[in-house]
Image (cartoon, grey):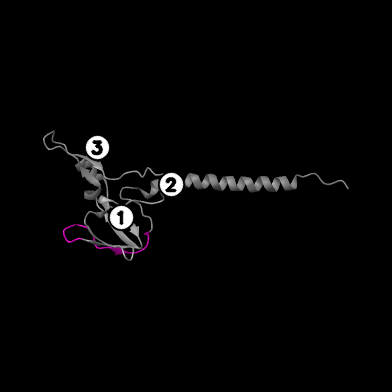
Amino acid sequence: MTLDCQAARSKLDDIYLLIEYHWMQISTEDYIIDISNPGIGLQQNCELGFEVNRNENADMWVLGAIFHRGYYARFDLAEGKIGLAPNTSGRKQAFLVGEIPEETLRDGVDAWLVLWIALPIILVITFAIVLYCYCQSDLLTSRPADDH
C-alpha cells in the first residue's frame, strides 16, 4: 500500500520507544519511506517502513534500518552489548531518561467526548452491581423456612 508522502508526514507523529529507561526516537522521516519514481507523476509515493514478524513463536521485536537511522551503533561482542548514540549528522534528540509518562489526551480530543462515552458505561456497571446485590438479598429473605 502506498501513501502520499506529504499527507502521511503531516498526519503521523514521531514514535518513541522506551528501552531500558531511555527514550529512543523513530521520526516520520525514518519510517515513511519515499518509493517515488521521479519520472512518473508529480505526487510522491511512500510506504511505511514497518514489517510484521511472521514467526508466531518469536517473542521479540526486530529493530532494523528505520530504527538505526540517525544513530551511531557500537557492537561489543565480548560483553554482549550494543551501544547507541545520536549521530552528529542526524536530527535525533539526545536520549531522554525517564519512566513511561502518564497517558494524556492527544490534541483535538475533547475531554467532554471522553466523559460522555465513559459515563454511560460506568452507569451500566453500577446499575448491574446494584441489581445483583438487590437480587441476592431478595433471594436470602424469600427462602422457605425449614420444617424440622
Q: CA distance from mark 2 to mark 3?
A: 29 Å
Q: Earlier in the sequence, mark 3 or mark 1?
A: 3
Q: Residues within 10 Å of mark 3 (few under 14, many from 20)?
A: few
Q: Nearer the viewer, mark 1 or mark 2?
A: 2
Disc 2, disc 3: CB below 8 Å?
Answer: no
Q: Does 12 lie within the magenta span?
A: no
In the picture provided, is 122 more to the left or to the right than 131? left
Main SS of the magenta part reads loop
Q: Position of residue 84 (x, y in %)?
A: 26, 61
- Spot the residue most to the top: 40
Amino acid tagged 3: Thr
Q: Does 98 lie within the magenta span?
A: yes
Report how many numbered discs are placed on residues in the image. Answer: 3
Amino acid tagged 1: Tyr
- Check disc 1 and report the residue beneath it: 16
Name the residue nearer the viewer: 82 or 44. Answer: 82
Q: CA distance from mark 3 to mark 1?
A: 23 Å
Q: Position of residue 71 (x, y in %)?
A: 23, 58
Q: Position of residue 3 (x, y in %)?
A: 24, 38
Quadrant of the rendered structure where residue 37 is? top left
Amino acid tagged 2: Asn
Which disc, if any, is residue 91?
none
Q: Earlier in the sequence, mark 2 or mark 3?
A: 3
Residue segment shown in magenta: 87-101
Q: Earlier in the sequence, mark 1 or mark 2?
A: 1
What residue appears at the point 29 percent right and 58 percent down from the top-left corner? 24
Question: In the rendered view, would you say 26 is above or below 124?
Answer: below
Label 3, secondary structure: give it.
loop
Disc 1, disc 2: CB below 8 Å?
Answer: no
- Check disc 3 and report the residue beneath it: 2
- Check disc 2 and report the residue beneath it: 57
Q: Nearer the viewer, mark 2 or mark 3?
A: 2
